[in-house]
Image (cartoon, rainbow, N blue to C red):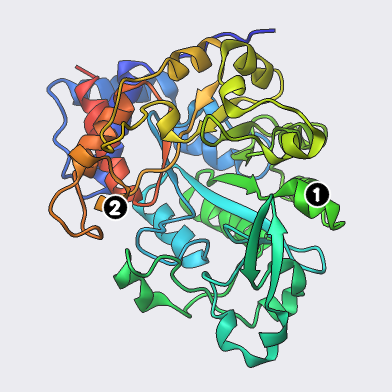
Amino acid sequence: MTQPQPQRPTPARRAVLGAAGAAVLGGSTVLAGGTAQAVQSAMGQEGNQGQDQGQGQGDGKGRGYRSLPYPTVIGHRGASGYRPEHTLGSYQLALDMGAHVIEQDLVPTKDGHLVCRHENDITGTTDVADHPEFASRKTTKTVDGVALTGWFTEDFTLAELKTLRAVERIPAARQKNTLYNGRWAVPTFEEVLRWAEDEGRRRGREVWLHVETKHPTYFRSLGLGLEEPLAKLLRRYGRHRADSAVFLQSFEPGSIQRLGRLVDAPSVVLLSSADSRPWDFVASGDPRTVADLITPKGLAEIASYAQGIGPTIDLILPRDASGRLGAETSLVRDAHRAGLILHPYTMRNENTFLPTEYRRGTDPAAYGDAFGLLQRYFATGIDGIFSDNADTALLAAADYAAAHAR
C-alpha cells in the first residue's frame, strides 16, 4: 500500500535550522529578515525540543526521524573530509561540527564482533601492511563479484584487529588527513553506541546514527550474518524502536527486510547506479536492476518495508559526458509520493568529486564551489545528504533554510 507523502518542513522549522547553523558555525550565516520571529514562533510551537530529545536518548522515547532538521546533514563516515574515516575522532568531529546524524559502516571480525570500516578490505584504511606478524594473512578474495587482494576483517579476531591503527584512505586527495594516521584504533559498533550514549547525556539530546550493513549476503555465506548481532546490540542500547535515533541502511534490500523482522528502527535502502543490481538479487537470480527499483512500482514496494532511500546523487541529477549536471529526474517526486524520504550520497568539497561547472582551478584536491552545488542539490527537494564536510553542508543548509523562510 502506498504510504502518505511525508510532511514537508514549515518555514518556521527551516528558520530554526538556519539559526542553529549560524550558532554552531560561528554566526557566519546571515538570516533573512523576519527569521528571528519565525524562530521564536517555531520554538513556541515545538516546545522544549532539547528536553524531549534528551529524555529519548536510548530509551525508545525519542521523537522519531520526522523530527530531524531539514535538510538533514549526515556526517559521511564521520567527518571524513578532515579525519581518517570511521574512527572515534572522525565521529566526534562531525558531531562537534553539528552534523545531525553520524554514519557507521559495519563489517564482522573472525570472532563475530561488528566493527566500523567502510569495507572488510582494510588494506587502505589501516596500517596492517606494516605489521609483519600479519603478512601471511594477505590474500585474494572475491567479494560481491569483485576480486580483491589485501587483508580482510573476517580473518582477524577483534583482539588482533585492535593492534592496528586507522589511516587516511585517500591521501592523495586529503594530504592533511595523514597527520592523524595512527591516532585511533578501529572502533567496534558497541563502542560507538556507548560513545553516542555518553554524548547524548552530555548534550541533553539524542545522537543520531546511520548504520549500514556491508556485503550482508557475502558475510552470511561465511557464517557471519550481520543482522542478528546488529539487532542484539540495538536492543541492548534501546535503539530498536520505530522512534529510535537510528537509521538502518543497506545496498541489499533483503538485509533491510531481515532487519525489519528483528527490530522496528527506521530503515533506508541504498541505491547505486541505475544499471547495477543489488548483490542479494544477483545471488538469488532476481533480474531486476536499480532502474527497476526507482520506478513508481519499485518505490512502492520499497515503501512497504523501509522508510527511505539513499540513492547516489546521480540518480537525481545525472552528469553528461562532459561531467556537467544534466536535467533532473523525477526520483525525488516519485519517492515522496511513495512516502519515502531521500538521503542521497555523497557530497565532497574537493574538485575531483564535483561536476565540471562547480570545479575551481586545476588542482583536483582543492575545494570547488561546494556551497553552490549544495544549493542545487537542496533545491531538488531531497530530505538530507551525506557529506564528508559536515561544516560546509550545515552552512549551506542554513543558507537554504533562511532563503526559504521568507
Give how far across and how far down residue 336 sits, in percent.
50, 15
The structure residue drawn at horizontal position 41% and vertical position 58%, both measured from the top left corner, is 80
Give how far across and how far down residue 297 sits, in percent.
63, 11
Few, some or many residues within 10 Å of mark 1 (<14, 14–19, 20+): some
| Local secondary structure at mark 2 | helix
Quadrant location of residue 369? Answer: top left
Looking at the picture, does residue 64 appear above or below residue 162? Answer: above
Looking at the picture, does residue 232 appear above or below residue 167? Answer: above
Q: Which amino acid does label 1 sit on?
A: Lys
> Is residue 138 left or right of 397 when viewed as pictured?
right
- The label shown at residue 352 is 2
Which one is in front in this view, the residue at disc 2 or the one at disc 1?
A: 2
Give how far across and how far down residue 230 sits, in percent.
75, 49
The residue beneath circle 1 is: 232
Q: How far apart are marks 2 and 1 (CA)?
A: 40 Å
Q: Identify the mark nearer the N-term, 2 or 1.
A: 1
Of residues 194 and 313, the one nearer the viewer is 313
| Local secondary structure at mark 1 | helix
Give how far across and how far down residue 234 sits, in percent.
73, 47
The structure residue drawn at horizontal position 27% and vertical position 47%, both measured from the top left corner, is 392
Few, some or many residues within 10 Å of mark 2 (<14, 14–19, 20+): some
Of residues 385 and 320, the one nearer the viewer is 320
- The label shown at residue 120 is none
Inspect this view and state whether residue 180 appears: yes
Looking at the picture, does residue 138 appear above or below residue 278? Answer: below
Of residues 16 and 141, the one nearer the viewer is 141
Given contact means CB atoms under 8 Å apart, are the residues at marks 2 and 1 in contact?
no
Quadrant location of residue 288? Answer: top right
> Is residue 106 left or right of 87 when viewed as pictured?
right
Q: What residue type is labelled 2?
A: Thr
The structure residue drawn at horizontal position 21% and vertical position 58%, both measured from the top left corner, is 366
